[in-house]
Amino acid sequence: MTNIANKTVLLTGASRGLGVYIAHALAKEQATVIGISRSKSGLNKTRDEVKALGGKFIGFTFDIRNLEKLSALVQHIHNTINPVDILINNTGVEIYQSFTNYSLEDLQSVLTTNLLAAMELTRLLLPSMLERGNGHIVNISSLAGKKGVPYNSIYSASKAGLIMWTDSLRQELVGTGIKFLAICPGYISETGMTVDSGLPTPILAGISTPKEVAQAVIKAIQKNKAEVIINENAIAEFVTKLIFAIGQITPQFVDTVYRWISITKLNQMRAENLANNQYKRA
């Protein structure tokens, strides 16, 4: 078991969406939360909410895509606050689009934000964790990283990369005291594209609240889990795992399932709305 109380947690994407709920959950566990985001006003709001819960929050306004400047940020955190005990790579963007319509800028933005920034932060923090013989790297992935989804292929690739990279590091650094965890939620209500697109998610696909996902993150850290799939309830999670297992044998069958439960249609509609500027690009 891992005790989160009094731990220093570095959380990216802390100003909106799931990141805010994770910050709240960490505050209730009496952790010190260091939040990173591009939005100063969003960080200030998260800080006030965390303090209202009796927690401690320190925000840094920073664009996680500036990979070459991450080293200075990490050094500043170590020198002025505490060495980081738990890193939660939560920042993520997605751009619904037909692959042929992506620009190079789109590819670089999604892959840098979702994957490369997590890798670089981890690379910078691992030496200190290894020296202390203790630490936790938590990567917020997605069910889209377990099974590719159409019209969101770059996001799927980035999240699949997170899962496989997490799996690789867990094996590479076994016995060092460092724990590696991949979190794979499905649709999340009240946040992200569920809100931005204004389109309902498929009923049969399941949906979780951000509070439920945040609490699952806390429990997974405490129990030193390696990978956690999160969906609406235990039955939905079991069915999701079963579908993924079948997909290892016959991927095209699961393609059909995704079309049948309207995941493919939803993504196509999101891509069409984005093309028509009905909501903002990530």
Image (cartoon, helix red, strand yellow):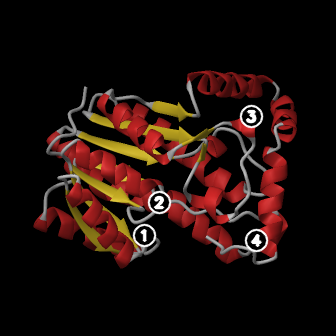
Q: Dots 4 and 1: beta carbons under 8 Å?
A: no
Sooner in the amino-acid sequence: mark 2 or mark 1: 1
Q: Position of residue 168 (x, y in %)?
A: 48, 38
In contact (CB < 8 Å): disc 2 and disc 1: yes
Left of 111 or right of it: where is 250? Answer: right
Expressed as whole percent of the image width and height from the top left, the position of residue 221 reads: 33, 35
Residue type beneath disc 1: Ile
Residue at which label 2 appears: 91
In the displayed structure image, the side of residue 243 where residue 71 appears, left or right: left
Q: Say what secondary structure mark 1 lies in.
A: loop
Tell me how far mark 2 sits from mark 1, CA to CA. 8 Å
Q: Secondary structure at mark 4?
A: helix
- The residue beneath circle 4 is 274
Q: Earlier in the sequence, mark 1 or mark 3?
A: 1
In the rendered image, the vertical position of residue 179 relative to residue 39, given as above or below: above
Q: Which of the marked residues, 2 or 4, is nearer the chain's N terminus?
A: 2
SS at circle 2? loop
In this rendered view, identify the residue nearer to me: 177 or 281. Answer: 281
- Residue at coordinates 73% horizontally, 75% vertically from top-left? 103
Describe the element under mark 3 as helix, strand or loop.
helix
Q: Earlier in the sequence, mark 4 or mark 1?
A: 1
Q: x, y percentage for residue 15?
A: 40, 66
| Residue drawn at (70%, 39%) of the image | 147
Q: Identify residue for label 1.
A: 64
Q: Quadrant of the C terminus?
A: bottom right
Q: From the viewer's perspective, is residue 100 above or below residue 181?
A: below
Visible in this render: residue 202?
yes
The residue identified by callout 3 is 204
Q: Is residue 173 visible?
A: no
Between the C-alphas of marks 2 and 3, the distance is 27 Å
| Image quadrant where one finds the N terminus | top left
Q: Are marks 3 and 4 in contact (CB under 8 Å)?
A: no
